[in-house]
Image (cartoon, rainbow, N blue to C red):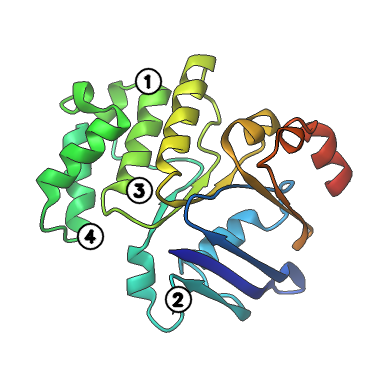
Amino acid sequence: MSLEVININKSYGEVKALKNISFKLKKGEIVGFLGPNGAGKSTLMKIITSFINQDSGKVIISSIDKDVDAILTKSKIGYLSENNPLYNEMTVLEYLNFVSQIYNLKNSKKRILKVSKEIGLVKVMEQEINSLSKGFRQRVGIAATLVHDPEILLLDEPTTGLDPNQLVEIRHLIKKIGQEKIILLSTHIMQEIPKICNRVIVINNGKLVDDKSLHSKEEKEIDFDEYFYNLTK
């Protein structure tokens, strides 16, 4: 289980969105993916998921080049976008059934039950999504990324807009999931980084400007607002 990004470049016309980005992630890593607006974070996530193609470089997912077998590598990824698009008129159960059908899961009932228990959705499975709180809607989005049991999760701003209690719940949930998977988590909430992540990668103007471990107590006690400002000013 691994995710390797090798010398990725991407341009939009004259604008160079990504410039020789390289890093490697392994099982058990929860990596904070930081950068100011326009730094290239969303572009790189879209390249990893094969939603768009890079101009040059490679993305290797569990030893498989995504450009050689995009279908197989997509099956190893769960992606939660920032706006968490959901079908609000569906119940939670209907929506997870719909997602499982997209992946053509043969054991969908068993898998949905397992994921709903892990994510804490059992009591709301028959409720329409539009009736749920922001925190539960985020849980539904995370459940949808997990239903096919991917190796890698890409989470784009998963804690934005949550109240303090919901923040703690989603934080604990991400940490639990991250024990058995690779998580690349994009966020602008700097105080969440040391509480969730064990590594941080920072890009600015399309370039990788830092890649830091957060395993020690001293590393976790960094003032991340100041750290981020100094790297991206």
Asked whether, in this view, residue 99 is left or right of residue 27, the answer is left
Q: Earlier in the sequence, mark 1 or mark 3?
A: 1
Task: Tell which tag, 1 or 4, sits nearer the viewer.
Answer: 4
Disc 2 + disc 4, Cβ < 8 Å:
no
Tell me the tag on residue 36: none
Q: Amino acid at mark 2?
A: Ser
Disc 1 + disc 4, Cβ < 8 Å:
no
Measuring 37% from the left and 80% from the top, which residue is drawn there? Answer: 69
Look at mark 2 in the image and give the residue it sits on: 63
Tell me the tag on residue 133: 1
Tell me the tag on residue 103: 4
Q: Amino acid at mark 3?
A: Thr
Furthest residue to the bottom? 68
Q: Amino acid at mark 1?
A: Ser
Q: Nearer the viewer, residue 191 or 144?
A: 191
- In three-dimensional space, the C-alpha distance between marks 3 and 4, rounded to whole angstroms, equals 11 Å
Q: Amino acid at mark 4?
A: Tyr
Furthest residue to the front? 216
- In three-dimensional space, the C-alpha distance between marks 1 and 3, rounded to whole angstroms, equals 19 Å
Look at mark 3 in the image and give the residue it sits on: 145
Residue 12 in the image, given as x and y percentages of width and height: 68, 71
Residue 122 in the image, given as x and y percentages of width and height: 20, 26
Task: Tell which tag, 2 or 3, sits nearer the viewer.
Answer: 2
Residue 75 in the image, given as x and y percentages of width and height: 32, 64
Numbered-mark total: 4
Q: Earlier in the sequence, mark 2 or mark 1?
A: 2
The image quadrant that residue 133 belongs to is: top left
How packed mark 4 is, by other alpha carbons closer than 10 Å (few <14, some 14-19, many 20 or more), is few
Q: Nearer the viewer, residue 168 or 98?
A: 168
